[in-house]
Image: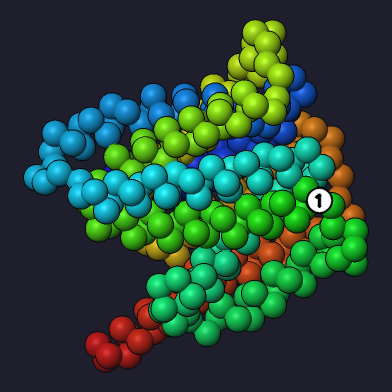
Amino acid sequence: MTRLQANFLLLLAGAIWGVGFIAQSTAMETLGPMWFIGLRFAVATLVALPFALAEKKRAKAQVRIADKIGFLLTGLALFLAAASQQVGLLTTSVTNSGFLTGLYVVFTPILTVFILRKRPHWVIWPAAAMSTAGIFLLSGGTFSTLTVGDLLTILCALLWSIQMISVGTFAGRSGRPLALSMVQFAVCAVLGCAVAALVEPISLSAVKGALPEILFAGFFASGLAFICQNVAQRYTTAPQAAIFLSSEALFAALFGVLLLGESISLAGYAGCAIIFVAMLATELVPEFLKGKERAAAAA
């Protein structure tokens, strides 16, 4: 695979995730958020199952009990993140949700300090300040106008960060990333359906009404997009991967305008741009400086 083809796959993943926000939003016209999460991740579990089984056949050792527990905890973090994002979409726009969810790029290295006791790159602190300024503008110039959905989506970004740190820890330690994917999807499916059965009504017509969104989110957004990412990142650089994957927020905003008729103020657009720059800076600046250091050492 060429680098151009790899970057196209990454762009495709970003576009799929961007459309995924539309599916998450429109599904709730007929189906409750918890039922959508449960059914979506049930489909994702079936998508991940054959890959996990193939990985198991190639594995040289069994997964340790400690790592199995880690898989379950990772699934719990994913469920809480998905739930806060899905419920947040009831009272925020697809555009806001796309950009605010992207704050996990900034939150992850900050949480690494507290969870893994690893010092982050200095760029994290100005990026965090930029993100705060972007949220301020996106909210219309006052934090008091942030909706409950906006706040839940910021919580979602925090939980995504915890989930990503868990994936980095347990996927690397166990050597079974596809098994981890399947387990965390299954945890979300079980918890989503269990909570939904307690708090949300359900009917066959409601499931039929949201079936296209369930299948899209389960098969494409949770299955195909992650496969595209995993394959493509073997053939391109980390900075380029960050740029193309960060397009998720831009696609969410674009499709929100084109398909749902959403609108945003000029200040909101400025806030989106600032958040996007902060996300890119978090990924690109450390890689750029490492490249300069390597070039200087080789000279």
Please, is residue 19 above or below residue 174 in the view?
above
Numbered disc total: 1
What residue lies at 33% left-to-right and 43% top-to-bottom?
Answer: 180
Q: Nearer the viewer, residue 213 or 66?
A: 66
Q: Nearer the viewer, residue 21 or 180?
A: 180
Please, is residue 158 above or below residue 182 in the view?
below
Q: Report which quarter residue 207 is drawn in.
A: top right
Q: Tell me the quarter of the image containing the C terminus.
A: bottom left
Whether residue 267 appears in this view of the structure is no
- Identify the coloring: rainbow
Q: Residues within 10 Å of mark 1 (few under 14, many from 20)?
A: some
Position of 267 compared to 64: left or right?
right
Please, is residue 28 above or below residue 145 in the view?
above
Which residue appears farthest toward the top when viewing the image?
204
Give x and y (percent) for residue 110. 53, 73
What residue lies at 59% left-to-right and 43% top-to-bottom?
Answer: 82
Please, is residue 108 above or below residue 76 in the view?
below
**Three-letter amino acid code at the position of disc 1:** Val
What residue lies at 73% left-to-right and 71% top-to-bottom?
Answer: 132
Q: Report which quarter residue 209 is drawn in.
A: top right
Whether residue 155 appears in this view of the structure is yes
Give x and y (percent) for residue 284. 49, 71
Give x and y (percent) for residue 251. 65, 44
Residue under pointer 1: 148
Give x and y (percent) for residue 165. 43, 61
What residue lies at 20% left-to-right and 32% top-to-bottom?
Answer: 54
| Secondary structure of residue under mark 1 | helix
Q: Tell me the quarter of the image containing the N terminus.
A: top left
Which residue appears farthest toward the left when viewing the image?
60
Position of 14 compared to 166: left or right?
right
